[in-house]
């Protein structure tokens, strides 16, 4: 039985993670933390979990957390996360970090996009990026896994195989992404007030969303190419679900069939990637750990569509998939 | 041309009111106020009104407002509203108050439900309740009109004629009400954060919503009966629209037809009440000043259904209807 | 391993049921039927289940079904359901019927509300009503269980204990109910077209919804009283979730605390009923088998609020709970 | 007073058009048609218009229509529309056609995309495309105006000025478009059933949407360039609103400021195009005839965002704007 802690357990990803871990036969959730001094019961914070788990959220030191947990799931904001994680690792915990702190390899890129010095720069380039479809073997033995961002997950899964094979050109890639509003987190904000966000559709952070360097880094290093993606996210009036529509120049005479064929071959043994012929909607994967992908040749472009649940495959489901790999459980445990 | 001011012009009712007043051929909006010290342009506060009106929101004294406006629409919170209105009236303005301050007649009832002493108690019982269907003639000459609450509007329009005629008994009336989320105002709150309120349905303030004494007072005084309504509001995951389902004991052998007949007769000449045979939905009246009402006899109860747009007939449209009466314009001006 | 069949597997309740059964360690789904002659793969009908189950929907005779399945979940329309079920029972299957066919005891009441003669009237009064909180022991041994309607589940769980104890009076009960739109089924209809139903709220079937006699029968027989509920359902613009707001005359000096105390005591050992002090929203129980209930004393009424997921506790979760009882598995298997 | 007829008056664009025309001081709506033989009253078809207009929908010949109307608004499906319009024109009516029939100039392109021979090919290239921002003067005198498609309106208004000035290159343009569901029309369809479309986001008709040749034709002819746009539409779970995110290669060292500057200059005198610095949402223009546009330089691309209400600026509002031009009324009449 692996003892698990969740740091920063008040948000949506923590709630979803708890729902999954409570179904995992080999996990006991022992610890939930908050950085506030009030000590709310988990049922107050997440009413849906009432009677499922009898724990109080506490403000605990890393040392204390390490006494209670073997594996720590970090749902803290960037920078705050790295500050805690090095101590947890030193104390012998294994860590799956939902923040962006260990996703990027280069402290300068981090400082540029996150506007803060990284507290633990040396560990950045040594940390595995927790996308099992690309890095499964490295995840297995890792003490620390950087859980991918939601947009990068959907974008990379669609683009990576075709970039590596050379079917699409690395330059000029456009990623037009759409996300449900849980992706923006739980703290209320004016523009996410129901009557503002409902029946509304807005682009945001055009040309400056922090997932941009993450996508470029993973695509470039894994596929050994040099990308420079244009990334445009949009908020969609729905709770959950994320769709990436990506456009790349085809390198030659690729057809819809050949693009689908390459994707099918690459993902043939993957438990959570479904290459489909129809155009997938976000509801097809809502509340699941699946990523549905399709491709079309249009003019001289490959149009790729990739659909995930931003809270599951884009966050908490991916974390459990990583956890299963790290502790040698069947990869789909608690995820089907 | 009547010069109009809107006090507290940052909220949803102010935005809707502006949209209506900009269509009114005899109104010039000269003044918008905010209690903040920043002086935002109306286009920043209400992007939908960009290029429609070139005004800046200002923090102004009543005296200054009275210099610029003949008629003042008050969208301030309760208590704050009454504090300003007496000065405006003294300075010669006529006022339509959206707050609850002058709806109730009794300062003790006000203090009990609003938990604050009324700043201008003497004027309470002298102020007309701005529901044209019940008080049209008194509204015409009034210096100050108390614009009704949204729930009371829908509830009273359904119940009042049948209570006065004796078709339903005054005791034991249940008002089960449902409202879109603009009814809760524009300031963001945790439970109105999109992912909390969307795909959710919640009762609130059961047995202690402040519209309860307003409904009882108007029904009791106008119909000359003694009611004691049970009022239960619910939040519905939609922007606008309000539906009241009201239950009262039939006094005798009323049928669906006789109930509809009474309502039809009572509202025969009303421009904004439509008595319908089908069950009305909120979308039938969205973005309009109409109230659609129907009735059914079920068991020994009359079931009344009444549907309005909470921001129009429940607030800003009602205010313009009152304005038209006060200034002797055709009652439907700017409202169709 | 129990072999399961689902009849009429194209709808929402079948999809939810499949999701639950695929998590059940002791169930193998062997058979899915449709009354159409096309034989679609389950992944075409329910894209979310792609790669989870490799079955084709078939139009099969009861005899054929009985060869393949031990337990049959019937998701057929009323009348069509009873026509098949008697054959399945004769062939040795146990059956959990989602239709209304075996919920009512009296063929005349059935004929009056469903406007068709019952095909198997003799079995009606012998069939257990599958609400474990009231009829757990009878469900255990039953060959056939009538799975309750969604509205009756929410209404009965709130009202039954207080009626039996005498805390509320049986006459004059009002049930104002609100449901997400999956409750109306999967076949498209004009008034459920997205732009008609979205941002809309409508009452329907006022005074003549078929769940009315079901509620009255169960409350009256179980609590040994004579009820005659007024039942008013409303459609809410959300996928799933159901809230009942019920009003009954208190029999004496019941307080909010005493009402909550009675409910707490009655449901103390129930795994899926949570008596709460706050006002529950439908999202608290979405995608779960829980029913959250609270109570308030308002005036001389008890106001009861009860919240379920109409597709889970109101249909498929209840069916799995019944299945677990029938086959002696732990009652919460596959439901947490 | 211009007498107006609406052909095919059962849909959403007809309903919105009626709402606008009822506010127009110089229009009398005399005729509503349907191709069904039932003769429903407009209040049955559009409950929101009850008591606003006392007309019955009728199945009328073009000759009969021409007797009753000076100007005909055609809301018929493609092909059906052209079959009627030539007769109406011969009978002396002026026509604003919402269908695609007279938008394209080339019968072969029409036949290829609409899979039917055009019934009136000779008139195609002579008909003005009803986008006032590009073709105002030709619209004024036109007997027939082809009202633009919703996607083309949003896409062309963003792209045309920058293509003409040479700021962006004509080849390789990507138009990623998102629309509310009223854009799909009123007849119910399985994938638009509320529980299918709600909380869902789906691309559709990728690479083969019929608005593609319309966009290419107008951009190419007006800006005198040769485009070949990649157009990808998506369905968004909201009633109305349309957002186009368009990507084009910048021709040189254009900056965000210079792109905005060009747009501002081009649209300086337009009553319904607002060039904004912020990223516009669809709600900023909902229920209005405005198109809000912004631009960003990202990498070597210009990212253009354009937002309209698909039913107003994308259909009925545009029609009224065209009507005002044709009959020499102030262009904003009934539209503010």
Image (cartoon, coloured by chain):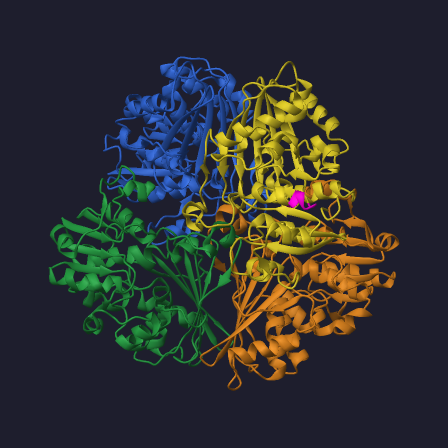
Chain colours: A green, B yellow, C blue, D orange
In the rendered view, would you say B83 is above or below C86? Answer: below
Q: Is residue C284 visible?
A: yes
Question: Where residue B150 appears, x then y in whole percent?
Answer: 59, 38
Tell me the residue at 45%/45% (across/down): B199
In the rendered view, would you say D168 is above or below D143? Answer: below
Question: Where residue B195 appears, x then y in whole percent?
Answer: 42, 50
Tell me the residue at 76%/52% (across/down): B26
Question: Where residue D222 appears, x then y in whole percent?
Answer: 68, 78
State which region is magenta: B88-93
Q: Nearer the viewer, residue A247 or C78?
A: A247
Q: Nearer the viewer, residue C107 or B220?
A: B220
Q: Nearer the viewer, residue B121 or A156?
A: B121
Question: Where residue D193 appears, x then y in whole percent?
Answer: 53, 47
Quarter location, residue A56: top left
Is D315 left, or right, of B230 in this rendering?
A: right
Quarter location, residue D269: bottom right
Q: Is residue C59 visible?
A: no
Q: Nearer the viewer, residue B148 or B82?
A: B82
Quarter location, residue D115: bottom right
In the rendered view, would you say A319 is above or below C224? Answer: below
Q: Is residue A157 magenta?
A: no
């Amino acid at each position: 039985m692996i003892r698990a802690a969740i740091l920063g357990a008040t948000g949506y990803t923590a709630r979803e993670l708890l729902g999954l871990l409570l179904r995992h036969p080999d996990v006991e959730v022992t610890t939930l933390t908050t950085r506030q001094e009030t000590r709310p019961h988990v049922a107050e914070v997440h009413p849906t979990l009432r009677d499922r788990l009898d724990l109080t959220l506490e403000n605990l030191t890393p040392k204390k957390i390490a006494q209670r947990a073997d594996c720590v799931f970090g749902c803290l904001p960037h920078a705050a996360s790295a500050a805690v994680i090095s101590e947890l690792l030193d104390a012998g915990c294994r860590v799956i970090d939902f923040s962006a702190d260990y996703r990027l390899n280069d402290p300068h890129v981090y400082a540029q996009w996150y506007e803060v010095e990284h507290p633990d720069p040396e560990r950045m380039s040594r940390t595995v990026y927790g996308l099992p479809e690309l890095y499964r073997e490295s995840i297995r033995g890792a003490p620390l896994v950087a859980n991918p961002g939601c947009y990068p997950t959907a974008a990379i899964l669609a683009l990576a195989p075709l970039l590596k094979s050379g079917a699409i050109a690395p330059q000029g890639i456009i990623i037009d992404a759409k996300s449900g509003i849980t992706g923006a987190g739980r703290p209320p904000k004016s523009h996410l007030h129901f009557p503002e966000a409902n029946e509304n559709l807005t682009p945001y952070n055009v040309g400056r969303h922090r997932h941009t360097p993450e996508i470029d880094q993973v695509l470039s290093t894994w596929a050994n190419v040099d990308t420079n993606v244009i990334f445009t996210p949009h908020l969609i009036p729905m709770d959950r679900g994320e769709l990436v529509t990506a456009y790349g120049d085809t390198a030659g005479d690729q057809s819809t069939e050949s693009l689908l064929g390459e994707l099918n071959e690459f993902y043939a043994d993957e438990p959570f990637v479904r290459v489909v012929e129809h155009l997938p909607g976000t509801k097809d994967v809502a509340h699941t750990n699946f990523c549905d992908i399709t491709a079309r040749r249009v003019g001289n472009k490959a149009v790729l569509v990739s659909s995930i649940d931003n809270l599951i495959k884009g966050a908490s489901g991916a974390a459990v998939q990583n956890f299963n790999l790290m502790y040698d459980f069947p990869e789909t445990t608690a995820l089907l």
